Amino acid sequence: MSLEVAVLVTATLAGVLAVLLVVTNDDPTPRPKSSAQPGRPARIAGAGGAAVVVIAASGWLVAAVIVAVGCWAAIGSWQRRASRTVTDLQRIDALASWIENLRDVLTAGDQPVGAINATVATCPAAIRPQVRR
């Protein structure tokens, strides 16, 4: 495999990752955007550095843009990991509670898809967007 193909594959995977990170935002409570964003210099440096490396290695501008966007999104997701309003433990507790409720509904004789739809309204708020989806 040549260097150009490797860079193209890497750029494509980074682009797909960026789209997935943007589309699957699991934060149940939207936060207001503040004008002061302390992580912006790190995101700019990471995205710019990745773009420069891709351009230097391949000379492809489109691949560099895709990699830069992927790095921008990945760094932003990494920076927001500690500020999520729902912790992993809260999500696990909510999931356990919802599964018990789902078990009860399934025991009553409902079909799996119908049982999921029936429990959306009563599931804990920490996992409600995922259950609804």
Image (tube, helix red, strand yellow):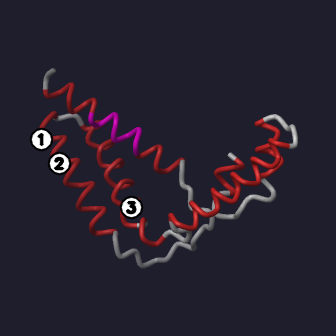
Of residues 41 and 101, the one drawn nearer to the viewer in this rendering: 101
Q: CA distance from mark 3 to mark 2?
A: 19 Å
Contact, CB < 8 Å: mark 2 with mark 1?
yes
Residue 20 placement (x, y as % from top left): 47, 44
Instruction: Tell me what residue is drawn at x 87 percent, y 43 percent.
Output: 108
Residue 77 is drawn in which quadrant?
bottom left
Name which residue lies at 79% across and 51% down.
119
Question: Which amino acid, mark 3?
Answer: Gly
Percent from the top left, x then y, of residue 27? 57, 62
What is the crowding at mark 2: few (fewer than 14 residues within 10 Å), some, or many (at least 20)? some
Residue 43's quadrant in the figure? bottom left
Q: Is residue 5 magenta?
A: no
Residue that mark 1 sits on: 56
Bounds of the magenta segment: 10-17
Q: Residue at x 13, y 23 (%)?
A: 2
Quadrant in the picture for the N terminus = top left
> Which disc is residue 76 wearing?
3
- The alpha-carbon separation of the residues under discs 2 and 1 comes to 6 Å
Q: Main secondary structure of the magenta part?
A: helix
Circle 1 sits in a helix, a strand or a loop, which is it?
A: helix
Mark 3–mark 1 distance (CA, rounded to whole Å): 24 Å
The amino acid at mark 2 is Val
> Which structural element holds mark 2?
helix
21 sits left or right of 97 in the view: left
In which image quadrant can residue 6 be found?
A: top left
Q: As displayed, is residue 43 above or below residue 38?
A: above
| Mark 2 lies on residue | 52
